[in-house]
Amino acid sequence: MSSHPRQSTPPSAGPPLARDDGSAAVPGVIAPPPLIYLGGVAAGFGLEALLPSPSVPRALLWPVGVALIVVGGALALSFVRDFACAGTPVSPYAPSTKLVTTGVYRLSRNPGYLGMALVYCGIALVTGSLWALLPLVPVLGVIDRGVIAREERFLERRFGREYLRYKRRTRRWL
């Protein structure tokens, strides 16, 4: 789910299984990113069950929460669409075949992860579970270090200068 659409094929014919320098042909993320976010939401709901958050009028939480879910869902879906159009795998456990730099990837190197974070916040607000927002901080730390950093190292090895140019001109999140 890392940075990818302007369709660019690496110089080699097909993705390598391993490199001579011992580096893997896949990013080696620590866990599937959606599960990391779901784990945070579950921990937040657990906190909410133990210590209910203060009551906030639904009229305030509901519209903001729904808007975050819609915008986050659109970002996450656009990332899937952009990968499909480029013909490169969505899974961080499969080697990227194309570098995607168009569509939402012009604005963010990680629109899927940004979208999932927005959906996470929206779910917390819509359900009135404000404690669910607390685990988002460590979740984003895990996503940043355990997923994105690993994907970026992989993309640098895989696409070289082309990825470094893209990385310089496009922000990681927004």
Image (cartoon, rainbow, N blue to C red):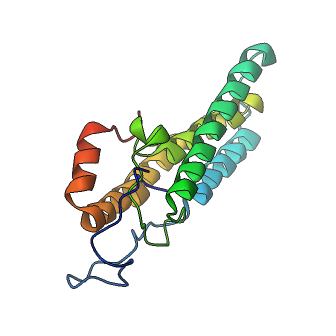
- Above or below: residue 108 compared with residue 164: above
Residue occupying the point 64% across, 35% down: 131
Q: In the depicted view, which residue is nearer to us: 98 or 127?
A: 98
At which x and y percent is residue 24? 34, 78
Q: Position of residue 142 (x, y in %)?
A: 45, 54
Give the quadrant of residue 132: top right
Which x, y percent locates residue 75? Answer: 58, 39
Image coords of residue 29 (percent x, y): 44, 66
Q: Which residue is at a point 25% across and 67% down the rendered structure image?
A: 157
* Image quarter hosting the C terminus: top left
Please tell me how many numbered marks the rendered image carries: 0
Please tell me in which quadrant of the rendered image residue 95 appears: bottom left
The residue that appears at 28% across and 46% down in the rendered structure is: 166
Q: Is residue 102 visible?
A: yes
Picture layout, residue 122 above or below residue 136: above
Closer to the camera, 126 or 42? 126
| Residue that appears at 53% across and 47% down | 112
Most foreground residue, 161 or 37: 161
**Does any portion of residue 130 appear in the rendered image?**
no
